[in-house]
Image: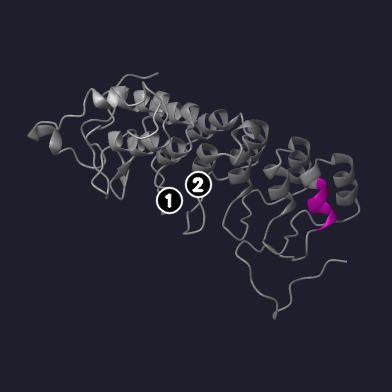
C-alpha cells in the first residue's frame, strides 16, 4: 500500500506525492507491457509514483518509446510535465528516444515545449538534437525536432554545458536535426565560449554539416577560446574532401568581416534554405 512521504524523508527535485523504489508500474511501462500496466492501474496503483531518482512510470515509458503505455498513463492522469532528479520531463525523454508518436501524445496532453532550464537539465529540443548514445536507436530525432519547433520550441535555448540546440546537433553530427534548425532560423554563428556550430561540425569531421553551415552563412574565420578556426580542427585525420570548403576561405577576412559579432548579427540567413 502506498503512503505519503514522511517529513524525515529526503526531498527530491520533481517529487510529486509518493516515493518508492522502482515499482512494477515502472517496470511494465519500461518494457511496454500494456496489459499488465492496465491491470496495475485498475488495481489502484498510482500512475504518479516516483522512484528514488524521481523518475515516474511516464518517464520510463518515454525513455523506451512505449507509445501504448504512454497513452495509458496519460489517460489515467499521469502528470505530463513531471521532472526527474535531473529536471528532465517526459517530453525530454521522448525527444531523446526519437519517438515521434510519444512526443505527439505528450503535446496533445499539454506538455510544455520550453520548460524552465536548470544547471542540470536541457530542453526537449536539445534532447532531440542529442539523441540516444546510439543513433541507430533514435531514427526519428529530426522529426521530433521539427514537430516541437512547429509547436514553439526556442531555437536559441541556451544550456550552460552545451550551448544552443544547433551546437548540440553539430557536436553529435546530427545533420538532419541541424537542417531543421537552420531552416527554422537558428543563428548559425551563435557562440558558446567563442565556439560556434562550425567548430563543432569540424571537430565531428562531418563534411555534410560543414558544407550546410557555410551555405547558411557560417563564419569560417571565427576563433574559439583556443584561438582556433574551424579548419584547424580538420587538418589531422580528416577525409580528403572534408576541409575543402573551409580551406577555400582560410585566408583572414577583411577588416569589415573581422568585426562579425559572436551571434552572427547581420549574417543570419545569408545562405539558402535546404
Q: Position of residue 9 (x, y in %)?
A: 70, 76
Front position in the image: 39 or 249 = 249
| Viewer-side residue, 206 vs 127 | 206
Report the side of 208 relative to 248 (left or right): right
Q: Which residue is mark 1?
A: 159
The residue that appears at 14% across and 37% down in the rendered structure is 258
Q: Secondary structure at mark 2?
A: loop
115 up-or-down from 188: above or below: below
Q: Residue furthest bottom?
A: 8
Q: Is residue 221 left or right of residue 241?
A: left
Judge left or right: residue 24 versus residue 177: right
Point out the image quarter for the N terminus.
bottom right
Give how far across and how far down residue 223 sits, in percent: 24, 42
Q: Which residues are magenta?
A: 23-28
Q: Nearer the viewer, residue 253 or 236?
A: 236
Q: Which residue is mark 2?
A: 123
Identify the residue at image location x=85%, y=54%.
24
> Is the Cβ of the residue at disc 2 closer than 8 Å to that at disc 1?
yes
Amino acid at each position: 500500500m502506498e503512503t505519503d512521504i514522511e517529513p524525515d524523508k529526503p526531498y527530491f527535485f520533481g517529487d510529486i506525492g509518493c516515493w518508492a523504489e522502482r515499482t512494477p508500474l515502472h517496470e511494465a511501462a519500461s518494457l511496454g507491457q500494456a496489459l499488465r500496466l492496465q491491470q496495475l492501474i485498475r488495481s489502484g496503483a498510482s500512475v504518479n509514483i516516483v522512484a528514488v531518482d524521481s523518475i515516474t512510470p511516464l518517464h520510463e515509458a518515454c525513455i523506451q518509446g512505449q507509445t501504448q503505455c504512454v497513452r495509458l498513463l496519460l489517460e489515467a492522469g499521469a502528470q505530463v510535465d513531471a521532472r526527474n532528479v535531473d529536471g528532465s520531463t517526459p517530453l525530454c525523454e521522448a525527444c531523446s528516444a526519437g519517438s515521434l508518436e510519444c512526443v505527439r501524445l505528450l503535446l496533445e496532453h499539454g506538455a510544455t515545449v520550453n520548460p524552465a532550464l536548470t544547471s542540470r537539465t536541457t530542453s526537449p529540443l536539445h534532447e532531440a538534437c542529442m539523441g540516444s548514445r546510439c543513433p541507430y536507436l533514435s531514427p526519428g530525432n529530426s522529426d521530433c525536432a521539427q514537430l516541437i519547433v512547429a509547436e514553439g520550441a526556442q531555437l536559441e535555448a541556451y544550456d550552460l554545458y552545451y550551448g544552443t540546440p544547433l551546437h548540440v546537433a553539430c557536436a553529435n553530427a546530427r545533420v538532419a536535426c541541424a537542417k531543421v534548425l537552420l531552416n527554422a532560423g537558428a543563428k548559425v554563428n551563435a557562440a558558446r565560449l567563442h565556439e560556434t556550430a562550425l567548430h563543432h561540425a569540424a571537430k565531428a569531421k562531418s563534411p555534410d554539416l560543414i558544407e550546410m553551415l557555410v551555405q547558411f552563412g557560417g563564419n569560417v574565420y571565427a576563433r574559439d577560446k583556443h584561438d582556433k578556426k574551424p579548419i584547424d580542427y580538420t587538418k589531422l585525420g580528416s577525409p580528403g574532401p572534408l576541409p575543402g570548403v573551409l580551406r577555400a576561405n582560410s585566408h583572414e577576412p577583411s577588416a569589415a568581416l573581422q568585426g562579425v559579432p559572436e551571434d552572427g548579427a547581420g549574417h543570419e540567413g545569408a545562405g539558402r534554405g535546404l
